[in-house]
Image (cartoon, rainbow, N blue to C red):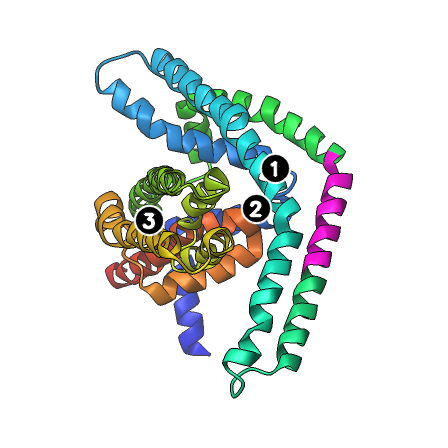
Amino acid sequence: MNLIADWFRRTFSDPRVVALILALVVGFTVILFFGDMLAPVLASLVIAYLLEGVVSILEHYHLPRLLTVVVVFFAFMLFVVLIIFGVLPLASSQLTELVQQLPYMISSGQKSLMRLPELYPDLVTAEQITRLITVMKNEVALAGQKILSTSAASVVGIITLLVYLILVPLLVFFFMKDKELIVQWFLRFFPKDRGIADQVWIDVDMQIANYVRGKFWEVLIVGSVGYVTFSLFGLHYALLLGVLVGLSVIIPYIGAAVVTLPVLLVAWFQWGWGGAFGGLAAAYFVIQALDGNVLVPLLFSEVVNLHPVAIIVSILVFGGLWGFWGVFFAIPLGTLVKAVLTAWPSQQLEA
């Protein structure tokens, strides 16, 4: 008991450590319990943080901050408009077409599966194939019901989207324009000598900024290269699959493995076991290899120095807490935990 009491006295006698702990607890509590209500604010804060890097680059050329904020903001809005009215309608139409083609694909796949007992009677039986086909049909039926329930709630989704389209741009602009005022207001709640908090923030700020901006470029490059490659091969649903391949890099290790299945299945249903299928599969795996061995080291260098086990644990924990955004920010949040643990012993040794 004396050991624990001594640890509490050493730790909580330092106001800098107490301020850091309170900031972390309050931040995680707000996100955990009020994340849904504050989703537009949190999304705007993240976007403003990402755009701040571009603003800082322009400020190096001695341009007024208000001018750089306006230029970057309108460039961001142009990008959003291109995504909403250019990419999303095409991807949505291809998704609808893919859903309509699912019965034909299942029928074709069923015929191919039924030949397996004839080719490999010692490994596969007709009963196993029948059970597998029944399970697949049930899963497709459940997926159809989910799609119908989603479409029934589309009115609520449209209202939510309109709220985001109005609130988020306004919040992004004011977060960028009044950055110094907002930061100074928050710093009022910290002691002037922040010590460990400053050390953690410097480490996390560098890691998160480089990681998120690098991940944005990785998504854009991999998705674009995937779309161009699929289009050159004449693969159906090239844009939809390119978007999926681009988004798959958000989840390290797991995303690429999950997206590989639909890409290869669409190619197999379109061409069968032929040269076109082999060429497309080879090109796809080359893209994945170049991403992992060339693009990722080029974009991230030594910024993210987490062990693969720590990355997977972060994805599972933060993804379970906050869904998509938890997965997207799993590595930065894991980096935050690592920075706190790294800085903590040095402060205790100094004491």
- The amino acid type of the residue labelled 2 equals Ile
Residue that numbered label 2 is attached to: 31
Q: Is residue 308 above or below residue 116?
A: above
Does residue 155 show up? Answer: yes
227 to the left or right of 138: left
Residue at 38% from the left image edge and 19% from the top image edge: 72
Q: Position of residue 280 (x, y in %)?
A: 36, 51
Q: Position of residue 252 (x, y in %)?
A: 39, 56
Res 7 quadrant in image: bottom left
Mark 3 vs mark 2: in front: 2
**Which numbered disc covers residue 279?**
none
**Which numbered disc covers residue 38?**
1
**Which numbered disc covers residue 200?**
3
Which image quadrant: the C terminus? Answer: bottom left
- The amino acid type of the residue labelled 1 equals Leu
Residue at 55% from the left image edge and 82% from the top image edge: 124
Q: Is residue 349 above or below residue 156?
A: below
Q: Nearer the viewer, residue 86 or 97?
A: 97
10 Å crowding of disc 2: few (<14), some (14-19), many (20+): some
Q: Main secondary structure of the magenta part?
A: helix
- The amino acid type of the residue labelled 3 equals Val
What separation in Å lies between label 3 and label 1 (alpha carbons)? 25 Å
For the residues bearing labels 2 and 1, Cβ distance under 8 angstroms: yes
Residue at 66% from the left image edge and 69% from the top image edge: 133
Specify the segment rendered in magenta: 140-154
